[in-house]
Image (cartoon, grey):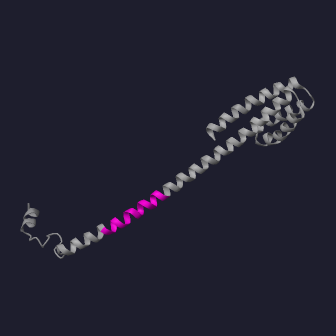
Amino acid sequence: MKFCAIALSATSSQIPWFPDISSDRMANKVTIIVALAAIISPVITAIINNRHQRKMRELELKEQQRNDVILHKREIFEGYLQYAGACIAHAEPSELQNYGGYYQRALFYAPPELHREMLLLHDEMREYKWDDAKTTLNAITIALKAFNELNTIHM
């Protein structure tokens, strides 16, 4: 009640809780504060947006690089399997040459648990053990399929 009486008894140019500040000076200060906020707010928003866009672009580039690596490995393994199968089916010089081109790259990118089987397949093919090579190639194909699915999803 006392506050209402003070507020009602005050004149329009005199604010009871700011007795030394005139309403014009107060309005000027409020105007300056609002103007500064109007200038600073878009700058801060732009900085936050730029940081967010930069992070999103970095994530997109990482995803693209990951997809490129997966595609590159897939092409190498598919070529290796294709030409190994062609050599087993009918060993012609062109298939042997293409197989040789893919063999070392596939061995390089293959998971360590497949190295032994890939080396075994290579030896079986060099020794013309086609039935053994076909069985080994089937095992490698199944293992590479599982490896590819695991790395495509969880990489």
Task: Give above or below for 130 relative to 54.
Answer: above
**Magenta stretch holds residue 37:** yes
Would residue 77 appear left or right of 59 to someone viewing this image?
Answer: right
> Could you tell me how many numbered marks the image carries?
0
Q: Choose top left, top right, bottom left or bottom right for residue 72.
A: top right
Would residue 131 appear left or right of 1 to someone viewing this image?
Answer: right
Would residue 25 appear left or right of 110 to someone viewing this image?
Answer: left
Task: Give above or below for 100 relative to 42.
Answer: above
**Magenta stretch holds residue 36:** yes
- Quarter of the image with the N terminus is bottom left
Most foreground residue, 47 or 85 = 85
Residue 93: percent from left, percent from top: 90, 34
- Quarter of the image with the C terminus is top right
Magenta-colored span: 35-50
Residue plotted at (69% across, 35% down): 148
Task: Give above or below for 75 relative to 135.
Answer: below
Would residue 9 appear left or right of 135 to someone viewing this image?
Answer: left
Most foreground residue, 130 or 26 = 130
Q: Residue furthest top?
A: 131
Q: Choose top left, top right, bottom left or bottom right for residue 124.
A: top right
Residue 152: percent from left, percent from top: 64, 38
Residue plotted at (50% across, 55% down): 53
Residue 109: percent from left, percent from top: 76, 42
Residue 70: percent from left, percent from top: 68, 41
